[in-house]
Image (tube, coloured by chain):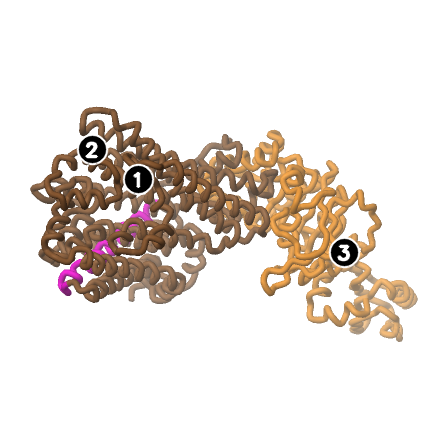
Chain colours: A brown, B orange
Amino acid sequence: MPDAFAGTGTLLRLAIRRDRWLLPAWVLALAAMAGFSASATANLYPDISSRVDAAEVINATPSLVALYGRVYDPTSIGSLALIKLTALGAAMVAVLMIVVTVRHTRAEEAAGRLELLSAGVVGRAAPLAAALTLTSGASVALGLLTAAALIVAGLPAVGATAFGLGWAAAGIAFSALAAVTAQLTTGSRAATGLAIVGLAVAYLLRAVGDIPDSGPSALTWLSPIGWTQQVRPFAGDRLALLLLPVLLAIVLVAIAFELRARRDLGAGMIAERSGPARGDITNTWGLAVQLNRGVLVFWGVAMILFGVLLGSLTSSVSGMLDSPAMRDFFESLGGEQGIVNAFLSAELAIVGSIVAAFGIQAAGHLRAEETAGRAEVVLATATSRLRWANGLFGVALGGVALLMLLVGLALGVGHALDVGNTSMIGDLVLASLARIPAAWILTALVMAVFGWAPQLTGLVWGLYAASVVLVELGALWNLPSWMMDLSPFTHSPKLPGATGVIVPLITLTTCAGLLAAIGYVGWSRRDLTP
Amino acid sequence: MAVSVTSSDLVIEAHGLVKSFGTTKALAGLDLEVARGEVHGFLGPNGAGKSTTLRVLLGMLRIDAGTVRLLGGDPWRDTAMLHSRLAYVPGDVSLWPNLSGGEVIDLLGRLQGGQDPARRDRYLELFDLDPTKKSRTYSRGNRQKVALISALSSNADVYLLDEPTAGLDPLREVDFRTCVRELRDEGRTILLSSHILSEAEALSDRVTIIREGRAVETGRLDQLRHLTQTSVTAELVTVPDGLERIAGVHNLIVDDHRVTAHVEQRGMDALMQALSASGIRSLVSQPPTLEELFLRHYGPAASSQSNDA
């Protein structure tokens, strides 16, 4: 083994030891999600004609095609069952692998722990090699487990394998992208963020590329997410296309190793700029804004693009109301009046649950600042615990509200551009704002856990994932309503078009307030626990 | 507990502090008294409970038992009020990676309730810190300087310094000592936790030595020194008999005309009389250092010796 790779095995064991619970849990959850969806859809659409109806509704609806992609074989149960999980699921796998890659490379380097390890017999390329081995192994394991789950659910083996390997290929390709971004920036959050921007661009390319009825355009073929989708599991199983993401990964990994070989430990490719000699941050609010600014700007831009795109695709829905099956399908999406409203409402449900992730991430600064010892620095000044938490928690809540406002406006503008009148903008902004309280419940849940069991703060991400899955897939899985009621998103008013919105809004906001109050009480009473 | 100070002079007054983390007892009945206007050395090996004590004084940890007063207030209840009158330098300074050093100093100054801009600029120059660099690029010593500058530029009554020079080079350490003396001359109180004995010895008016969560010794350095032994080396014309019988003389070595011994305070007078009666050619006497005090409390012989002290 060349010198540069010395110690890879030891580092890989360290990485496995550190991830021994989290990574298997996510892998199993994702595989189980695919398996559940497959078996539930089989029950929901027992005969061919019902499947064809459902598939045609999706294919005829540009906003759904943009979000999920097309059903390439309307008669295939697998193709229909996994429509929500082909591209979107691949993106989830990609996020997981990006996070794991950066966690074991740039994050270790930025924290200074890699310096300690590098003093041992550890080659320059070893940390990267260990991280990529871990993510590739986890991706392949995830792919095989998913394939097995689909086969158990009764889907054909070839299609199941194609689907599982598609996820695996997406995981490997985006892990390789993260390997490159981890060489570019000096901060680990910036490295993760840059890789996620890459993923978002890939997703957007295929969203736009998939819309033409004539089939995927060149844009789709520029996107690694598009490639995994064009494998078309259960509808052609073009397994050879899996070579594309693997080739991309090989190129990216080669670039990453080359960059690593040329740079110093701790350095990035993007030079660190110097900052001001005098500061103008005056209080904990300013500090919290500063901590969240970069991420918030990124989210804002992404949400505006997403909103305009979805908004401009909605009106074409109302043009094709020919079959009762379609009507039924639209109604089942949760809207109450009018096809367009049902769609906008369904889109806002998705956007609302995505934006909730920002709130959890931003409120997560509470715990991150505490473990890093920076909370101690601030609390040793004349800043009370209450004020310190107010800044970070307030910016998390405010950021969620701001993002929903932006999405509402963008959706309205996109819709107005499409239909040529602005009458819906106000309704869409209100409908978007109505999704805030449900997202706030998860933000406040971070505060509550942080106040009483700070070591468990990260578990809120698991509860978040469960909440999203319950509301997005619960109906498909035919879950009992009490179970779906556990998700805060279930209770969001389905605006535009719904009535009786005041009571749920008050209830949700009160719940968020209670959770936050519980958190504040715990935080004011407990020890600082780094 | 030798020093007689009235309780109104006490800036820090802690009695019987107990703090457990799970099954580990970090503080096991700690007593600590720091008088107004003194530099108080707070000494102990790693894990003795120094940082835990400071965090209790900062209201970051709640004690399980005991009483603690800081500037007459309760550190847990009156936290923010007390903090406007204190400054703190943590042992391991962690800063926001994307803020520059200057931004952090100014932020902490404002949160503190104001800092002296003239002092800020003076200390920036004294410690030779570039305030435009992002915190991410600072070495440990430079991060420590950021915390020190922001603490020293504040107008606090009490300074809690947790091993503040651990990352500084010797030159800056000298500057740091000058700063601390200046603060003391202005009547401010400094609690200086350290395991660097020379630093505490050079700066402290009084010291408290802690071990396993308990104060084992406290007082002025010269008062503590009587607890340990002065080392004496003498060259004599003739070596008298019976030196080993003088109470308080230990480790006596006679090598031709050269005598070395460790002497407790009580045996010093008798030894000197015996030596001078024999004709002294040269005499070297070294006062006990804190190192020896430490070895006494943490060394292998610590438990047996502390019984007859």
Q: Residue A339: which quarter of the image?
A: top left
Looking at the picture, does residue A246 appear above or below residue A340?
A: below
Residue B308 in the image, given as x and y percentages of width and height: 81, 69
B104 left or right, relative to B196: left
Give the SS element for disc 2.
helix
Looking at the picture, does residue A389 appear above or below residue A461?
A: above
Distance, label 2 to label 3, CA atoms, is 76 Å
Q: What's drawn in magenta, residue-wise?
A: A156-185
Label 1 or label 2, whichever comes before in sequence order: 2
Looking at the picture, does residue A139 appear above or below residue A342?
A: below
Residue B183 in the image, given as x and y percentages of width and height: 70, 39
Distance, label 1 to label 2, CA atoms, is 20 Å
Give the SS element for disc 1.
loop
Q: Which mark is residue A312?
A: 2
- Which residue is painted at 22% across and 50% down in the image? A84
Would residue A411 be visible to someone looking at this image?
yes
* Mark 3 burial class by Cα count in 10 Å: few <14, some 14-19, many 20+: many
Residue B160 in the image, given as x and y percentages of width and height: 65, 46
Residue B97 in the image, given as x and y percentages of width and height: 45, 43
Q: Which residue is mark 1?
A: A494
Q: Which residue is mark 3?
A: B218
| Image quadrant where one finds the N terminus of chain A | bottom left
Assess whether residue A208 is covered by the magenta stretch.
no
Q: Chain of mark 3?
A: B
